[in-house]
Image (cartoon, rainbow, N blue to C red):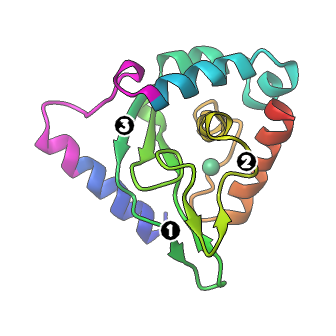
Amino acid sequence: MTQLEQTLIAGLSMWALSQDGFPQTKPDDSTEIREAVVESVERLNRPACSSLLGANARDILISARFVVISFGKPKLGSDGKFKVISASVDGDRNTIIINSEGPFMDPRLTVNGVRFNLGLDDHRFRALILLHELGHLTGKFQHDGADPELSRTYSNSVREACFL
Ligand SMILES: [Zn+2]
């Protein structure tokens, strides 16, 4: 586990302790999340998409909880590339955690003229972020929090199987 992940998990625990139970946002509470869930469920009708993410992907998505918290803005990595956390998961709680300062909430987020959206429109890009995280919840995708290259590979495979 990386230090960043430990910080994130510590942050989540503190949040949970300070609230009455684990914080959660129902899709109904956020237009962006609700629309992304609807779009994702539609995308899962494609055989290539559902076989990439798992036969149970639709059910897991529909029963998933959503939390929006800050993981911070894009940061320059030691390799000279900008990185930002779009979202993460808490598998034990079947929860998708969205970065309030990341590209899900702001798909037009730009660093040095480069966008994070893989050339998709806002609507589809948000669904791609959810489907990527769904791959972690279904166990089809390995943990990639410390491996941006692997994370990109997963995003590209979701793009190909579900959006092209
Ligand atoms: Zn990932």
For residue 46, above or below residue 100? above
| Percent position of residue 108, x then y | 57, 53
| Residue 126 forms part of the magenta stretch | no
| Percent position of residue 134, x then y | 61, 33
For mark 3, give the secondary structure.
Answer: strand
Which residues are the magenta region? 14-31
Residue indicated by mark 1? 74
Label 2 CB less than 8 angstroms from ligand 1: yes
For residue 163, above or below residue 34? below
User: 125 left or right of 22?
Assistant: right
Asked if the residue at tag 2 contacts the one at tag 3, i.e. Cβ–Cβ closer than 8 Å, the answer is no
Amino acid type of the residue tagged 2 in the rendering = Ser
Cα–Cα gap, marks 3 and 2: 21 Å
**Residue closer to the observer: 109 or 54:** 109
Q: Report the label total.
A: 3
Amino acid type of the residue tagged 3 in the rendering = Val
**Residue closer to the observer: 19 or 74:** 74
> Which tag, 1 or 2, sits closer to the chain's start?
1
Q: Residue at x 65, y 58 (%)?
A: 116
> Which tag, 1 or 3, sits closer to the chain's start?
3
Circle 2 packing at 10 Å, graded few (<14), some (14-19), many (20+), is some
> Which tag, 3 or 2, sits closer to the chain's start?
3
Tell me the mark number nearer the camera, choosing from 1 and 2: 1
| Percent position of residue 31, x then y | 43, 26
Residue indicated by mark 3? 67
Residue indicated by mark 2? 155
Asked if the residue at tag 2 contacts the one at tag 1, i.e. Cβ–Cβ closer than 8 Å, the answer is no
Q: Residue at x 62, y 40 (%)?
A: 122
Cα–Cα gap, marks 1 and 2: 17 Å
Return the mark for residue 123. Answer: none
Q: Residue at x 48, y 36 (%)?
A: 91
